[in-house]
Each structure stands twice: as structure tokens, then as C-alpha cells.
Image (spheres, rainbow, N blue to C red):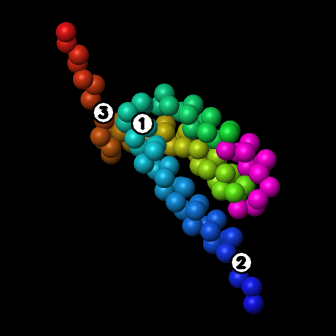
């Protein structure tokens, strides 16, 4: 009997990749606002393009999951702004710089 672990590895890695993006969206919105949406767009494009070029199923799939999570995070970034406005998350206070 031969065991194949590719599916379970993809599943576990997908869980961790999605879990990684949750704090990235929160911190990104906190420190940069929604201005950092282009970083998620760029990482999504690069990741999806790389997934097309990689022959190995495991790495190709993980790159595609990373890319899809990046694209999804763009929408979540704007949703996070609404959650901050509702008071569900803290808003970053801008410091006054005095000479």
C-alpha cells in the first residue's frame, strides 16, 4: 500500500496561508490604510504567474493559493477599513510632529 500525502500537505499549507493573510490585512490597514492594496495585487499577480510556470503540482498549487489569498485580501483590506470605522478594531492615531 502506497500513501500519498500531497493532498493533506496542500490542505494544511492552505490553512496556514489563509491564516497568514488575516493579520497581514489587519496590520496593513492599521499602518498604511487602504493605500497598500497594490502590494496584495502585485503579490497575487506574481504568485499566480509563477504557479503557471511551475511544473510540480504541490508548489504550483501553493503558489496559486497564495496568489488567490493575495487577491482576496484586497477586498478584505477595504472591509477592514469599514470594521475600523465601526469601532471593531483600533484606529491608528497620527502623531503630531512639532519642531
Dot label at residue 67 = none
Give the Cα distance between marks 3 and 1.
9 Å
Q: Residue at x 75, y 61 (%)?
A: 57
The residue pinned by badge 1 equals 29
- The alpha-carbon separation of the residues under discs 2 and 1 comes to 40 Å
Which residue appears farthest toward the bottom when viewing the image? 1
Check the image and report above or below for 50 versus 12: above
Q: Secondary structure at mark 2?
A: loop
> Is 88 left or right of 78, judged from the image as shown?
left
Q: Quadrant of residue 29?
A: top left
Quarter residue 85 falls in: top left
User: Quick check: 10 above or below 35?
Assistant: below
Instruction: Classify mark 1: helix, strand or loop.
Output: helix
Task: Identify the residue shown where x is 55% and y is 55%.
Answer: 17
**Nearer mark to the viewer, of 2 and 3:** 2
Of 50 and 68, nearer the camera is: 50
Q: Name the residue located 40 percent from the left edge and 41 percent from the top edge.
A: 27
Q: Which residues are magenta?
A: 47-58
The answer to whether one can see residue 59 in this image is yes
Element marked by disc 3: loop
Q: Is residue 82 visible?
A: no
How far across and down, in percent of the image, does residue 33 sit?
A: 42, 31
Q: Quadrant of the N terminus?
A: bottom right
Q: Which residue is mark 3?
A: 92
Residue 89: horizontal and vertical position, in percent?
Answer: 33, 43
Distance from the alpha carbon under mark 2 to that under mark 3: 47 Å
Give the residue pinned by disc 2.
4
Q: Position of residue 12 (x, y in %)?
A: 57, 67
**Total count of labels:** 3
Name which of mark 3 and mark 1 comes first in the sequence.
1
Q: Quadrant of the C terminus?
A: top left
Q: Is residue 19 magenta?
A: no
Amino acid at each position: 500500500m502506497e500513501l500519498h500525502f500531497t493532498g493533506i500537505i496542500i490542505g494544511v499549507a492552505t490553512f496556514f496561508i489563509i491564516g497568514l493573510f488575516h493579520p497581514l490585512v489587519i496590520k496593513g490597514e492599521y499602518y498604511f490604510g487602504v493605500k497598500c492594496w497594490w502590494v496584495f495585487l502585485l503579490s497575487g499577480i506574481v504568485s499566480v504567474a509563477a504557479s503557471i510556470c511551475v511544473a510540480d503540482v504541490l508548489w504550483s498549487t501553493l503558489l496559486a493559493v497564495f496568489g488567490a489569498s493575495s487577491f482576496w485580501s484586497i477586498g478584505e483590506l477595504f472591509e477592514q477599513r469599514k470594521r475600523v470605522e465601526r469601532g471593531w478594531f483600533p484606529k491608528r492615531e497620527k502623531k503630531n510632529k512639532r519642531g
